[in-house]
Image (tube, grey):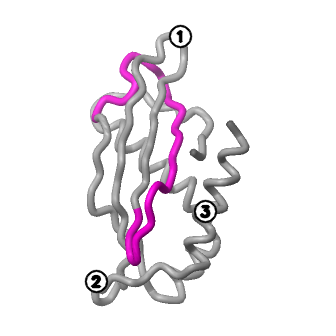
Amino acid sequence: MLELDAIDDEGGPGSGSRWFEQGRAALFARCPHLAAFLRAENAALRVTAEQVAAHAAPGSRGARVGISIVEVRPSSFDMAVRIRGTGDDPGRPANGRCTIVVERRATGERVPIPRQVRDEFVAIQLAARELC
C-alpha cells in the first residue's frame, strides 16, 4: 500500500472521496508508463464505481491516505484506500474501493492495459511493501 503524507483538510461531507482522488493522483504520478500509454492511445482513466465513507476519519484535521491497486483486468483495475485521521483524535479509519476503466477519448471504447503498465503497477505495490 502506497502511503501519502498527511493531507491537510477539514474533513466533512465528501472528504473521503476527495482524499481518495488525491491518493489516486499521487499513485498515477508514479506511473510514467501509464501516462505514455494514455497519450499514445488518446485514452483516459474513468472512475466507474467508488465506495468510500463520506466522513472519513471524523474529528480529525487532515488524513493519512494509503492506496493500492488490488486487481487488474484486461481494460480496468480496482484500487483500495484506507484513510486514517491525524492529530490527537484520529477517529476510526475509513476504507474504500473504486473501479477505473481505460477508454478512448473519442469513442469511449475500452482499451486493453498493456503488460508494461501492469508490470508498473506490480512494481509500485512491491516497493510500497518495503516501506511498511
Q: Element at badge 1? A: loop
Highlighted range, magenta? 54-77
Say whether disc 1 or disc 3 marks the residue closer to the N-terminus.
1
Mark 3, Cα crowd under 10 Å, few <14 / some 14-19 / many 20+, is: some
Q: Quadrant of the N terminus?
A: top right
Residue 78: image location, x then y, percent = 40, 58
Say whether disc 3 or disc 2 marks the residue closer to the N-terminus.
2
Residue 122's tag is 3
Q: Element at badge 3? A: helix
- Alpha carbon separation for disc pair 3 and 2: 26 Å
Three-letter amino acid code at the position of disc 3: Val
- Alpha carbon separation for disc pair 1 and 3: 35 Å
- Magenta stretch holds residue 55: yes
Residue 88's tag is 1
Three-letter amino acid code at the position of disc 2: Gly
Three-letter amino acid code at the position of disc 1: Asp
Residue at 51% over, 46% down: 67
Residue 4, picture quadrant: top right
Q: Is residue 4 left or right of residue 130?
A: left
Q: On screen, 22 above or below 85?
A: below
Q: Which residue is mark 2?
A: 108
Mark nearest the camera among 3 and 2 is 3
Q: Residue furthest top?
A: 88
Residue at 57% over, 53% down: 26
Q: On screen, 108 above or below 126?
A: below
Residue 57: image location, x then y, percent = 40, 25
Q: Quadrant of the C terminus?
A: top right
Q: On screen, 103 above or below 45?
A: below
Q: On screen, 66 above or below 57?
A: below
> Pointer 1 and pointer 2: residues touching (CB < 8 Å)?
no
Residue at 46% over, 55% down: 70
